[in-house]
Image (tube, coloured by chain):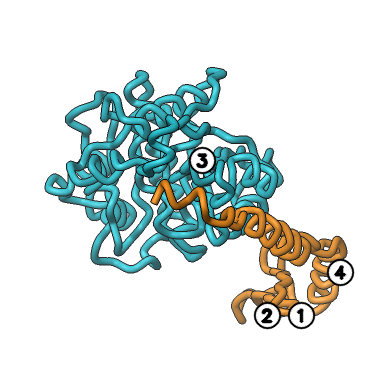
Amino acid sequence: MGLFDYFRSPPSKSAALAKERLQIIVAHERGSRRSSPDYLPALKKELLEVVRKYVPIDQSQVKVHLDREGGCEILELNITLPDEEQRLGPQR
Amino acid sequence: MATVIVVTSGKGGVGKTTTSASFATGLAQRGYRTVVIDFDVGLRNLDLIMGCERRVVYDFVNVINSEANLNQALIRDKRVDNLYILPASQTRDKEALTKEGVEKILNELKQSFDYVVCDSPAGIERGALMALYFADEALVVTNPEVSSVRDSDRILGILASRSRRAEQGDPPVKEHLVLARYAPDRAHRGDMLTVEDVLEILGIPLLGVIPESPAVLQSSNAGVPVILEDGSDAGAAYGDLVERFLGKDLPHRFTMSQKKGFLKRLFGGS
């Protein structure tokens, strides 16, 4: 090999290509990952207030989660209601 | 109070278990009481790399399920004082790791150890998430190769958003880059990402560069963490890494290509 290497064309610098591709894809993926909108805590608080008008729940029973898949955003709301008895209790 | 360190990467086969074994061994050699936990439920391998596979009686999941206590499950290393291994279960599935169960055991270990090293499985599923959730610091193991670097960046995002520190608004998990399987000659020729390239893309501090080395396979054949192989380049690199982790300012070795003589260049050989 060694002797013939001198007559070959210089090898392509594939690492430079790797770096360029990585910089682009990593920047892209970071962009879509980071931007968790800052209205989420306020949304959660207002939701809690609305639900509380009808059912007694506390903060830990409301879960708000935002996901991104492809170009699509999914807002997931999960509200755990208390047991039937607890709910009816205060009204009796 | 003990420090919990996760060894993680996203991608498989980049050297997480090799790094966990040598890092934990290096900390114990320097006098710190250290336990290393295998979080790869269903595919345990840390026991083989540490050479204690025939001494496994109880495992991590047995302790979580209160089928054994920690003292029964912890394996004391025969070569290095202060070093203990908690093996993963080979028979259960990943769902056996609950957040409450893992927390309970980590809290118990933190009472009697200085460092708790969590060897994460590959991927970003439950085992990997549980391994990093309680971490104070993270060793992100990366190879100078596109898919590994991309997956490491993904894991950094998860550390920043889904660890307990992130969820509770505590100071973030302290991140360290471990660049493994590095071949300085190939990087120098432009065939491999250089240390600087990877640092520029990932943007976290470099803890150590582990050179591609036959010693890693040889020591795993024998069940000896490579850091214990005196005179091996990878072992020395792990030794430096541990010293740096403990605060010593050491230059990075094994990042320069070896100068070849004229005859060797002419007639080849690497």
Which is in the foreground here, disc 4 or disc 2?
Answer: 4
Percent of width and height locating residue B226: 30, 35
**Disc 3 versus disc 4: distance between alpha carbons?**
45 Å
**Disc 3 versus disc 1: distance between alpha carbons?**
33 Å
Disc 3 residue type (three-letter): Val
Q: Is residue A86 above or below residue B48?
A: below
Q: Nearer the viewer, residue B198 or B8?
A: B198
**Disc 4 versus disc 1: distance between alpha carbons?**
27 Å
| Mark 3 lies on residue | B178
Asked whether the beta carbons under mark 4 and mark 2 sit within 8 Å of each other, the answer is no
Label 3, residues with CA under 10 Å away: few <14, some 14-19, many ≥20? many
| Mark 4 lies on residue | A46
For image coordinates 28% across by 56% down, the residue present is B44
| Mark 1 lies on residue | A71
Which is in the foreground here, disc 4 or disc 1?
Answer: 1
> Chain letter of disc 2?
A
Disc 4 residue type (three-letter): Glu
Percent of width and height locating residue A17: 66, 59
